[in-house]
Image (cartoon, rainbow, N blue to C red):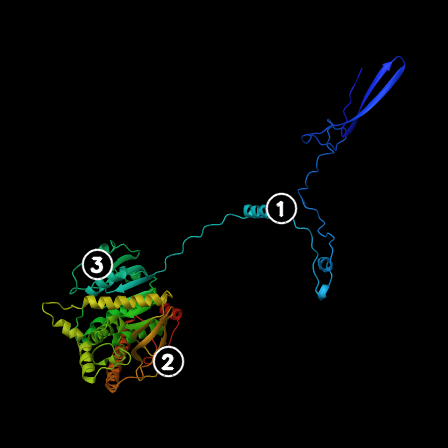
Amino acid sequence: MISLTVLTGWQSLASFKTRSNLVVWSVSSLRWYAKHKPPCDPLKENPPCRRAYDDITPAVDPNCPEPCDPYKKKKGILHKIKLRITEGGTNFGTPFRWLDCKPCKAEKEEPEREEKEETTKAIVKKPKEVIPCEEERPGLQVSVLGADTGVGQYVALLLKQCPYMKKLRLYESKCPEGCTRCLANVVQDLLHINTNCRVQAFSCQNFELERCLQNSDIVLMLDSGYVTRDMSIEARFAAQAPLVKCYTDAIATECPKAFIIVAATPIECMVPMIAETLRSSGWYDPARVLGSLAVPEMRASTLAARSLGLEPWYTKVPCVGGTEGESLVPLFSRAVDYYEFCEQTAEYMTNCVRSADEDILRCEGHCARSSDLSEAHALTRLVSQVAQALLCLDIPRVTGFVETNSVQLVSPANYLAIEVILNKHGICHQFDFPRHMNNYEICLLEHAMDYITHNVNTSRSWFFQNQEAELRSGKMGMITQFGCHRNYDHVYRYRSYIH
Protein backbone atom coordinates (compact mmCIF):
# COMPACT_ATOMS: atom_id res chain seq x y z
CA MET A 1 0.00 0.00 0.00
CA ILE A 2 1.37 3.36 -1.01
CA SER A 3 0.22 6.73 0.42
CA LEU A 4 1.29 10.28 -0.70
CA THR A 5 1.40 13.26 1.47
CA VAL A 6 1.74 16.74 -0.16
CA LEU A 7 3.32 19.50 1.93
CA THR A 8 3.84 23.08 1.15
CA GLY A 9 7.20 24.21 -0.25
CA TRP A 10 9.67 21.44 -0.50
CA GLN A 11 7.96 18.23 0.58
CA SER A 12 8.97 14.55 0.80
CA LEU A 13 7.18 11.58 -0.62
CA ALA A 14 7.47 8.45 1.56
CA SER A 15 6.73 4.99 0.37
CA PHE A 16 6.91 2.05 2.62
CA LYS A 17 6.28 -1.64 2.28
CA THR A 18 5.51 -4.24 4.78
CA ARG A 19 7.11 -7.52 4.16
CA SER A 20 6.75 -9.82 7.00
CA ASN A 21 8.27 -7.82 9.85
CA LEU A 22 10.54 -5.66 7.67
CA VAL A 23 9.74 -2.05 6.78
CA VAL A 24 11.57 -0.48 3.88
CA TRP A 25 11.47 3.39 3.58
CA SER A 26 12.06 5.15 0.33
CA VAL A 27 11.96 8.97 0.30
CA SER A 28 11.96 11.22 -2.77
CA SER A 29 11.70 15.06 -2.85
CA LEU A 30 9.10 16.89 -4.97
CA ARG A 31 8.28 20.64 -5.49
CA TRP A 32 4.82 21.94 -6.15
CA TYR A 33 4.03 25.43 -7.61
CA ALA A 34 0.90 27.52 -7.09
CA LYS A 35 -0.32 29.46 -10.13
CA HIS A 36 -2.54 31.86 -8.21
CA LYS A 37 -2.52 33.58 -4.86
CA PRO A 38 -4.21 31.44 -2.22
CA PRO A 39 -7.64 32.71 -1.31
CA CYS A 40 -6.89 32.47 2.40
CA ASP A 41 -4.37 34.18 4.60
CA PRO A 42 -1.40 31.77 4.98
CA LEU A 43 -0.09 33.62 8.05
CA LYS A 44 -2.95 32.45 10.22
CA GLU A 45 -2.64 29.50 12.47
CA ASN A 46 -3.91 26.25 11.00
CA PRO A 47 -4.60 27.50 7.48
CA PRO A 48 -7.35 25.59 5.67
CA CYS A 49 -5.11 24.98 2.62
CA ARG A 50 -1.44 24.50 2.10
CA ARG A 51 0.04 25.96 -1.02
CA ALA A 52 3.47 26.97 -2.14
CA TYR A 53 3.19 30.54 -0.95
CA ASP A 54 6.87 30.92 -0.21
CA ASP A 55 7.69 31.28 -3.86
CA ILE A 56 5.14 34.11 -4.48
CA THR A 57 6.60 37.62 -4.56
CA PRO A 58 5.51 39.67 -1.59
CA ALA A 59 2.74 42.18 -2.18
CA VAL A 60 3.66 45.83 -2.63
CA ASP A 61 3.08 47.99 0.43
CA PRO A 62 0.36 50.54 -0.58
CA ASN A 63 1.65 53.12 1.89
CA CYS A 64 5.27 53.10 0.74
CA PRO A 65 5.82 51.24 -2.53
CA GLU A 66 9.40 52.46 -2.90
CA PRO A 67 12.19 51.50 -0.51
CA CYS A 68 12.87 54.14 2.15
CA ASP A 69 16.62 54.06 1.71
CA PRO A 70 17.47 56.78 -0.78
CA TYR A 71 21.11 56.91 0.27
CA LYS A 72 23.02 54.40 -1.77
CA LYS A 73 26.72 54.27 -1.58
CA LYS A 74 28.42 55.59 -4.65
CA LYS A 75 32.02 56.13 -5.44
CA GLY A 76 33.61 59.49 -5.87
CA ILE A 77 34.18 62.71 -3.97
CA LEU A 78 31.09 64.38 -5.45
CA HIS A 79 28.86 61.78 -3.90
CA LYS A 80 30.38 62.41 -0.52
CA ILE A 81 29.67 66.14 -0.83
CA LYS A 82 26.07 65.45 -1.89
CA LEU A 83 25.67 62.93 0.91
CA ARG A 84 26.89 65.41 3.46
CA ILE A 85 24.50 68.06 2.15
CA THR A 86 21.54 65.71 2.17
CA GLU A 87 22.35 64.46 5.63
CA GLY A 88 21.94 67.98 7.02
CA GLY A 89 25.55 68.98 7.30
CA THR A 90 26.78 72.53 7.16
CA ASN A 91 28.61 72.38 3.88
CA PHE A 92 29.73 75.90 2.88
CA GLY A 93 28.14 77.19 6.10
CA THR A 94 24.54 76.66 4.91
CA PRO A 95 22.22 74.29 6.81
CA PHE A 96 19.92 71.97 4.90
CA ARG A 97 16.86 70.00 5.81
CA TRP A 98 16.68 66.27 5.95
CA LEU A 99 15.52 64.60 2.77
CA ASP A 100 12.87 62.02 3.46
CA CYS A 101 11.28 59.69 1.01
CA LYS A 102 8.64 61.27 -1.17
CA PRO A 103 5.07 60.89 0.06
CA CYS A 104 3.21 58.30 -1.86
CA LYS A 105 -0.15 58.80 -3.55
CA ALA A 106 -2.04 57.28 -0.65
CA GLU A 107 -0.51 59.74 1.81
CA LYS A 108 -1.42 62.62 -0.52
CA GLU A 109 -4.99 61.48 -0.94
CA GLU A 110 -5.65 61.06 2.78
CA PRO A 111 -5.28 64.77 3.79
CA GLU A 112 -7.33 65.76 0.76
CA ARG A 113 -10.09 63.48 1.88
CA GLU A 114 -9.90 64.91 5.40
CA GLU A 115 -10.16 68.45 4.02
CA LYS A 116 -13.14 67.50 1.90
CA GLU A 117 -14.85 65.92 4.90
CA GLU A 118 -14.19 69.01 6.99
CA THR A 119 -15.55 71.29 4.28
CA THR A 120 -18.63 69.14 3.83
CA LYS A 121 -19.21 69.12 7.57
CA ALA A 122 -18.76 72.91 7.73
CA ILE A 123 -21.21 73.40 4.86
CA VAL A 124 -23.75 71.19 6.54
CA LYS A 125 -23.38 72.95 9.88
CA LYS A 126 -23.78 76.45 8.40
CA PRO A 127 -27.33 77.76 8.50
CA LYS A 128 -29.05 78.58 5.27
CA GLU A 129 -28.32 82.08 4.10
CA VAL A 130 -31.36 84.32 3.95
CA ILE A 131 -31.74 86.02 0.58
CA PRO A 132 -31.69 89.79 1.25
CA CYS A 133 -34.60 91.83 0.00
CA GLU A 134 -34.01 94.28 -2.80
CA GLU A 135 -33.34 97.80 -1.68
CA GLU A 136 -35.96 100.38 -2.35
CA ARG A 137 -35.48 102.19 -5.62
CA PRO A 138 -33.84 105.56 -4.95
CA GLY A 139 -36.23 108.37 -5.67
CA LEU A 140 -37.67 111.57 -4.32
CA GLN A 141 -41.11 112.96 -3.74
CA VAL A 142 -41.78 116.20 -5.59
CA SER A 143 -44.73 118.52 -4.98
CA VAL A 144 -45.65 120.96 -7.74
CA LEU A 145 -47.71 123.89 -6.46
CA GLY A 146 -49.68 125.57 -9.24
CA ALA A 147 -49.83 122.54 -11.52
CA ASP A 148 -53.18 123.55 -13.01
CA THR A 149 -51.52 126.06 -15.35
CA GLY A 150 -50.05 125.25 -18.74
CA VAL A 151 -46.48 125.30 -17.41
CA GLY A 152 -47.48 123.05 -14.53
CA GLN A 153 -48.97 120.41 -16.79
CA TYR A 154 -45.91 120.32 -19.04
CA VAL A 155 -43.63 120.16 -16.01
CA ALA A 156 -45.67 117.22 -14.69
CA LEU A 157 -45.34 115.46 -18.04
CA LEU A 158 -41.55 115.85 -18.09
CA LEU A 159 -41.06 114.98 -14.41
CA LYS A 160 -43.11 111.79 -14.90
CA GLN A 161 -40.35 110.62 -17.26
CA CYS A 162 -37.51 111.58 -14.91
CA PRO A 163 -35.89 108.45 -13.36
CA TYR A 164 -35.13 110.22 -10.06
CA MET A 165 -38.78 110.77 -9.14
CA LYS A 166 -40.59 108.28 -6.93
CA LYS A 167 -43.79 110.22 -6.34
CA LEU A 168 -45.20 113.31 -8.02
CA ARG A 169 -47.93 115.33 -6.32
CA LEU A 170 -49.75 118.05 -8.23
CA TYR A 171 -51.65 120.81 -6.48
CA GLU A 172 -54.08 123.07 -8.28
CA SER A 173 -54.86 126.57 -7.10
CA LYS A 174 -57.91 128.55 -8.09
CA CYS A 175 -57.33 129.31 -11.75
CA PRO A 176 -60.24 130.94 -13.56
CA GLU A 177 -58.12 132.30 -16.42
CA GLY A 178 -55.79 129.34 -16.91
CA CYS A 179 -56.22 126.05 -18.65
CA THR A 180 -59.77 124.71 -18.47
CA ARG A 181 -58.70 121.07 -18.37
CA CYS A 182 -59.29 119.47 -14.98
CA LEU A 183 -56.14 118.40 -13.15
CA ALA A 184 -57.66 115.03 -12.23
CA ASN A 185 -58.04 114.23 -15.94
CA VAL A 186 -54.42 115.24 -16.50
CA VAL A 187 -53.28 112.85 -13.77
CA GLN A 188 -55.27 109.99 -15.25
CA ASP A 189 -53.62 110.70 -18.56
CA LEU A 190 -50.13 110.76 -17.02
CA LEU A 191 -50.66 107.40 -15.33
CA HIS A 192 -50.56 105.71 -18.75
CA ILE A 193 -46.87 106.57 -19.13
CA ASN A 194 -44.75 103.48 -18.45
CA THR A 195 -42.57 104.82 -15.64
CA ASN A 196 -42.42 103.99 -11.93
CA CYS A 197 -43.28 107.51 -10.82
CA ARG A 198 -46.63 107.71 -9.05
CA VAL A 199 -48.77 110.78 -9.77
CA GLN A 200 -51.48 112.20 -7.50
CA ALA A 201 -53.74 115.23 -7.76
CA PHE A 202 -54.78 117.58 -4.94
CA SER A 203 -57.22 120.49 -5.04
CA CYS A 204 -57.53 123.69 -3.07
CA GLN A 205 -61.29 123.31 -3.02
CA ASN A 206 -60.92 120.29 -0.73
CA PHE A 207 -58.24 121.95 1.43
CA GLU A 208 -55.63 119.37 0.47
CA LEU A 209 -52.53 121.57 0.55
CA GLU A 210 -51.16 119.94 3.71
CA ARG A 211 -51.73 116.45 2.30
CA CYS A 212 -49.93 117.41 -0.88
CA LEU A 213 -46.85 118.61 1.02
CA GLN A 214 -46.51 115.76 3.49
CA ASN A 215 -42.98 114.23 3.48
CA SER A 216 -41.99 116.04 0.28
CA ASP A 217 -38.31 116.29 -0.63
CA ILE A 218 -38.59 119.00 -3.30
CA VAL A 219 -41.25 121.69 -3.57
CA LEU A 220 -41.63 123.61 -6.83
CA MET A 221 -43.65 126.85 -6.66
CA LEU A 222 -45.10 127.98 -9.98
CA ASP A 223 -47.11 130.98 -11.05
CA SER A 224 -50.82 130.86 -10.42
CA GLY A 225 -53.47 131.69 -12.98
CA TYR A 226 -53.99 135.13 -11.50
CA VAL A 227 -50.95 136.71 -13.19
CA THR A 228 -49.77 137.27 -16.74
CA ARG A 229 -46.47 138.42 -18.18
CA ASP A 230 -47.82 141.80 -19.25
CA MET A 231 -48.43 142.81 -15.61
CA SER A 232 -45.92 144.92 -13.70
CA ILE A 233 -43.75 143.57 -10.92
CA GLU A 234 -45.80 145.29 -8.20
CA ALA A 235 -49.09 143.94 -9.58
CA ARG A 236 -47.80 140.40 -9.84
CA PHE A 237 -46.36 140.50 -6.34
CA ALA A 238 -49.60 141.84 -4.85
CA ALA A 239 -51.57 139.07 -6.61
CA GLN A 240 -49.34 136.15 -5.64
CA ALA A 241 -47.87 137.15 -2.28
CA PRO A 242 -50.81 135.87 -0.14
CA LEU A 243 -50.84 132.55 -1.98
CA VAL A 244 -47.06 132.05 -1.66
CA LYS A 245 -47.30 133.01 2.03
CA CYS A 246 -49.90 130.27 2.49
CA TYR A 247 -47.65 127.80 0.69
CA THR A 248 -44.73 128.67 2.96
CA ASP A 249 -46.74 128.25 6.16
CA ALA A 250 -47.83 124.80 5.03
CA ILE A 251 -44.25 123.86 4.14
CA ALA A 252 -43.05 124.90 7.62
CA THR A 253 -45.68 122.60 9.11
CA GLU A 254 -45.56 119.52 6.85
CA CYS A 255 -42.09 119.39 5.26
CA PRO A 256 -39.78 121.97 6.86
CA LYS A 257 -36.61 120.27 5.54
CA ALA A 258 -37.71 120.18 1.91
CA PHE A 259 -35.72 121.89 -0.82
CA ILE A 260 -37.78 124.81 -2.15
CA ILE A 261 -37.43 125.93 -5.78
CA VAL A 262 -39.15 129.26 -6.32
CA ALA A 263 -40.41 129.90 -9.86
CA ALA A 264 -43.32 132.17 -8.91
CA THR A 265 -42.68 135.65 -10.30
CA PRO A 266 -41.37 138.06 -9.28
CA ILE A 267 -38.70 135.79 -7.85
CA GLU A 268 -36.72 138.70 -6.40
CA CYS A 269 -39.65 139.47 -4.12
CA MET A 270 -40.82 135.93 -3.36
CA VAL A 271 -37.50 134.51 -2.13
CA PRO A 272 -37.01 137.15 0.66
CA MET A 273 -40.63 136.77 1.73
CA ILE A 274 -40.30 132.98 1.93
CA ALA A 275 -37.08 133.34 3.91
CA GLU A 276 -38.70 135.70 6.43
CA THR A 277 -41.71 133.42 6.83
CA LEU A 278 -39.57 130.37 7.51
CA ARG A 279 -37.31 132.36 9.82
CA SER A 280 -40.28 133.43 11.94
CA SER A 281 -41.36 129.79 12.27
CA GLY A 282 -37.87 128.62 13.24
CA TRP A 283 -37.34 126.30 10.25
CA TYR A 284 -35.33 128.53 7.94
CA ASP A 285 -32.28 127.03 6.23
CA PRO A 286 -30.63 129.29 3.61
CA ALA A 287 -29.18 126.20 1.90
CA ARG A 288 -32.69 124.92 1.11
CA VAL A 289 -34.22 127.91 -0.73
CA LEU A 290 -33.32 128.60 -4.36
CA GLY A 291 -34.83 131.06 -6.82
CA SER A 292 -34.93 129.77 -10.38
CA LEU A 293 -32.94 131.40 -13.18
CA ALA A 294 -33.22 128.42 -15.49
CA VAL A 295 -35.40 130.16 -18.07
CA PRO A 296 -33.27 133.32 -18.73
CA GLU A 297 -30.07 131.26 -18.62
CA MET A 298 -31.48 128.85 -21.21
CA ARG A 299 -32.45 131.72 -23.51
CA ALA A 300 -29.08 133.45 -23.17
CA SER A 301 -27.18 130.24 -23.90
CA THR A 302 -29.31 129.57 -26.98
CA LEU A 303 -28.70 133.08 -28.34
CA ALA A 304 -24.93 132.80 -27.82
CA ALA A 305 -24.80 129.39 -29.54
CA ARG A 306 -26.76 130.62 -32.56
CA SER A 307 -24.61 133.69 -33.01
CA LEU A 308 -21.40 131.61 -32.82
CA GLY A 309 -22.71 128.67 -34.86
CA LEU A 310 -22.04 126.18 -32.06
CA GLU A 311 -24.05 123.50 -30.36
CA PRO A 312 -26.22 124.98 -27.58
CA TRP A 313 -25.19 122.12 -25.29
CA TYR A 314 -21.57 123.36 -25.19
CA THR A 315 -22.33 126.99 -24.45
CA LYS A 316 -23.44 128.29 -21.09
CA VAL A 317 -24.10 131.93 -20.28
CA PRO A 318 -24.44 132.51 -16.51
CA CYS A 319 -26.91 135.15 -15.40
CA VAL A 320 -26.10 137.16 -12.27
CA GLY A 321 -27.67 140.04 -10.36
CA GLY A 322 -31.45 139.67 -10.51
CA THR A 323 -33.95 137.44 -12.24
CA GLU A 324 -35.78 139.64 -14.75
CA GLY A 325 -35.94 143.07 -16.28
CA GLU A 326 -33.26 145.63 -15.58
CA SER A 327 -31.77 143.60 -12.74
CA LEU A 328 -30.87 140.62 -14.96
CA VAL A 329 -27.27 140.63 -16.23
CA PRO A 330 -26.33 137.79 -18.63
CA LEU A 331 -22.56 137.37 -18.87
CA PHE A 332 -21.99 136.71 -22.58
CA SER A 333 -18.25 137.12 -22.06
CA ARG A 334 -18.28 133.74 -20.26
CA ALA A 335 -20.10 131.87 -23.05
CA VAL A 336 -16.96 130.52 -24.77
CA ASP A 337 -13.37 130.59 -23.55
CA TYR A 338 -10.95 132.93 -25.30
CA TYR A 339 -13.73 134.74 -27.16
CA GLU A 340 -15.61 137.92 -26.37
CA PHE A 341 -18.51 139.52 -28.18
CA CYS A 342 -18.29 143.10 -29.26
CA GLU A 343 -20.17 145.63 -27.16
CA GLN A 344 -22.94 146.19 -29.73
CA THR A 345 -23.65 142.47 -30.09
CA ALA A 346 -23.60 141.92 -26.32
CA GLU A 347 -25.99 144.84 -25.79
CA TYR A 348 -28.40 143.55 -28.42
CA MET A 349 -28.48 140.02 -26.99
CA THR A 350 -28.87 141.36 -23.43
CA ASN A 351 -31.96 143.35 -24.47
CA CYS A 352 -33.37 140.27 -26.23
CA VAL A 353 -33.04 138.14 -23.07
CA ARG A 354 -34.57 140.82 -20.86
CA SER A 355 -37.57 141.45 -23.13
CA ALA A 356 -38.18 137.82 -24.12
CA ASP A 357 -41.54 137.64 -22.33
CA GLU A 358 -42.79 140.80 -24.04
CA ASP A 359 -41.69 139.53 -27.43
CA ILE A 360 -43.58 136.28 -26.91
CA LEU A 361 -46.73 138.18 -26.08
CA ARG A 362 -46.55 139.93 -29.48
CA CYS A 363 -47.06 136.60 -31.29
CA GLU A 364 -50.00 136.32 -33.65
CA GLY A 365 -53.20 135.11 -32.08
CA HIS A 366 -54.70 135.45 -28.66
CA CYS A 367 -52.26 133.55 -26.42
CA ALA A 368 -51.12 135.03 -23.14
CA ARG A 369 -48.79 132.11 -22.28
CA SER A 370 -46.93 131.09 -25.43
CA SER A 371 -43.68 130.16 -23.65
CA ASP A 372 -45.04 127.27 -21.61
CA LEU A 373 -43.02 124.54 -23.34
CA SER A 374 -39.62 126.21 -23.05
CA GLU A 375 -40.19 127.25 -19.43
CA ALA A 376 -41.32 123.75 -18.50
CA HIS A 377 -38.19 122.27 -20.08
CA ALA A 378 -35.88 124.64 -18.18
CA LEU A 379 -37.62 124.08 -14.84
CA THR A 380 -37.61 120.30 -15.26
CA ARG A 381 -33.89 120.34 -15.92
CA LEU A 382 -33.32 122.37 -12.75
CA VAL A 383 -35.45 120.00 -10.67
CA SER A 384 -33.57 116.98 -12.01
CA GLN A 385 -30.22 118.60 -11.11
CA VAL A 386 -31.42 119.24 -7.57
CA ALA A 387 -32.67 115.64 -7.35
CA GLN A 388 -29.29 114.30 -8.44
CA ALA A 389 -27.59 116.39 -5.76
CA LEU A 390 -29.95 115.23 -3.01
CA LEU A 391 -29.49 111.59 -4.06
CA CYS A 392 -25.68 112.00 -4.03
CA LEU A 393 -25.50 111.13 -7.73
CA ASP A 394 -23.87 114.37 -8.83
CA ILE A 395 -22.60 117.73 -7.57
CA PRO A 396 -24.10 120.17 -10.07
CA ARG A 397 -23.22 123.81 -10.50
CA VAL A 398 -26.32 125.90 -11.12
CA THR A 399 -27.37 129.54 -11.04
CA GLY A 400 -29.96 130.65 -8.51
CA PHE A 401 -31.28 133.61 -6.57
CA VAL A 402 -30.22 132.93 -2.98
CA GLU A 403 -29.40 134.69 0.25
CA THR A 404 -25.72 135.59 0.17
CA ASN A 405 -23.33 134.18 2.72
CA SER A 406 -21.04 136.88 4.10
CA VAL A 407 -18.29 134.30 4.66
CA GLN A 408 -18.20 133.18 1.02
CA LEU A 409 -19.36 136.33 -0.79
CA VAL A 410 -19.21 140.03 0.07
CA SER A 411 -21.89 142.06 -1.71
CA PRO A 412 -24.01 145.14 -1.01
CA ALA A 413 -27.24 143.13 -1.42
CA ASN A 414 -28.45 140.39 0.91
CA TYR A 415 -29.94 138.40 -2.01
CA LEU A 416 -28.28 137.88 -5.37
CA ALA A 417 -28.39 135.62 -8.40
CA ILE A 418 -25.05 133.81 -8.44
CA GLU A 419 -23.60 130.41 -9.26
CA VAL A 420 -23.79 127.82 -6.48
CA ILE A 421 -22.84 124.17 -5.93
CA LEU A 422 -25.41 121.69 -4.66
CA ASN A 423 -24.93 118.53 -2.60
CA LYS A 424 -27.11 116.31 -0.44
CA HIS A 425 -27.49 119.09 2.17
CA GLY A 426 -28.51 121.75 -0.35
CA ILE A 427 -26.40 124.76 -1.30
CA CYS A 428 -22.88 124.05 -0.09
CA HIS A 429 -20.86 126.78 -1.80
CA GLN A 430 -21.47 130.18 -3.40
CA PHE A 431 -19.21 131.59 -6.11
CA ASP A 432 -18.22 135.21 -6.42
CA PHE A 433 -18.76 137.18 -9.60
CA PRO A 434 -16.36 136.23 -12.41
CA ARG A 435 -13.19 138.27 -12.44
CA HIS A 436 -12.93 138.60 -16.21
CA MET A 437 -16.00 140.75 -16.86
CA ASN A 438 -15.91 143.56 -19.38
CA ASN A 439 -16.78 147.15 -18.54
CA TYR A 440 -20.26 146.87 -20.03
CA GLU A 441 -21.23 143.98 -17.76
CA ILE A 442 -19.76 145.69 -14.70
CA CYS A 443 -21.88 148.79 -15.36
CA LEU A 444 -25.00 146.67 -15.78
CA LEU A 445 -24.30 144.85 -12.51
CA GLU A 446 -23.83 148.08 -10.56
CA HIS A 447 -27.06 149.45 -12.00
CA ALA A 448 -28.92 146.20 -11.15
CA MET A 449 -28.08 146.45 -7.45
CA ASP A 450 -30.56 149.27 -6.98
CA TYR A 451 -33.43 147.26 -8.46
CA ILE A 452 -32.56 144.21 -6.38
CA THR A 453 -32.42 146.19 -3.14
CA HIS A 454 -35.73 147.87 -3.92
CA ASN A 455 -37.51 144.56 -4.62
CA VAL A 456 -36.10 142.91 -1.47
CA ASN A 457 -37.19 145.83 0.72
CA THR A 458 -40.66 145.77 -0.85
CA SER A 459 -41.17 142.09 -0.02
CA ARG A 460 -39.87 142.44 3.53
CA SER A 461 -42.06 145.44 4.25
CA TRP A 462 -45.09 143.55 2.95
CA PHE A 463 -44.26 140.60 5.22
CA PHE A 464 -43.91 142.73 8.34
CA GLN A 465 -47.16 144.56 7.61
CA ASN A 466 -48.96 141.27 7.10
CA GLN A 467 -47.46 139.94 10.31
CA GLU A 468 -48.64 142.96 12.25
CA ALA A 469 -52.12 142.64 10.77
CA GLU A 470 -52.28 138.98 11.82
CA LEU A 471 -51.19 139.94 15.31
CA ARG A 472 -53.94 142.52 15.63
CA SER A 473 -56.54 140.06 14.39
CA GLY A 474 -55.40 137.45 16.91
CA LYS A 475 -54.15 134.91 14.37
CA MET A 476 -50.61 134.92 15.75
CA GLY A 477 -49.63 133.87 19.24
CA MET A 478 -46.16 135.35 19.20
CA ILE A 479 -44.48 138.25 17.47
CA THR A 480 -40.90 139.45 17.48
CA GLN A 481 -39.47 142.88 17.17
CA PHE A 482 -39.87 143.98 13.58
CA GLY A 483 -36.63 144.44 11.70
CA CYS A 484 -34.64 142.00 13.87
CA HIS A 485 -33.52 138.69 12.32
CA ARG A 486 -33.78 135.96 14.93
CA ASN A 487 -34.16 132.20 14.80
CA TYR A 488 -36.79 130.79 17.14
CA ASP A 489 -37.29 127.22 18.08
CA HIS A 490 -40.26 125.50 16.49
CA VAL A 491 -41.43 124.10 19.82
CA TYR A 492 -41.59 127.39 21.65
CA ARG A 493 -43.78 128.85 18.94
CA TYR A 494 -46.49 126.29 19.54
CA ARG A 495 -46.14 126.56 23.31
CA SER A 496 -46.75 130.27 23.17
CA TYR A 497 -49.61 129.73 20.75
CA ILE A 498 -51.31 127.37 23.21
CA HIS A 499 -50.92 129.84 26.06
C-alpha distance separating marks 1 and 2: 77 Å
The residue lying toward the viewer, choosing from 241 and 441, is 441
Q: Closest to the observer: 88 or 279?
A: 88
Marks 3 and 2: in contact by CB < 8 Å? no
- Mark 3 and mark 1 in contact? Answer it, CB < 8 Å: no
Q: Is residue 182 left or right of residue 404?
A: left
- Give above or below for 233 relative to 85: below
Residue 54 versus residue 497 in the image, above or below: above
Q: Residue furthest top?
A: 20
**Identity of the amino acid at label 3?**
Leu
**Marks 3 and 1, how far apart in space?**
82 Å
Q: Which residue is mark 2?
A: 408
The image quarter containing residue 314 is bottom left
The three-letter amino acid code for the residue at tag 1 is Lys
Q: Is residue 323 above or below residue 150?
A: below
Q: N-terminal of the two: label 2 or label 3?
A: 3
Residue furthest right as drawn:
21
Which residue, given by chain and number where applicable, does mark 3 sit on?
Answer: 183
Q: Which mark is on residue 262?
A: none
Residue 105 is marked as 1
Disc 1 element: helix
Density class for disc 1 (Cα within 10 Å; few <14, some 14-19, many ≥20) is few
- Please state if 458 lies on the left or on the right of 15 as rendered: left
Disc number lying in front (2 or 3): 2
Please provide percent x and percent y for residue 412.
31, 84
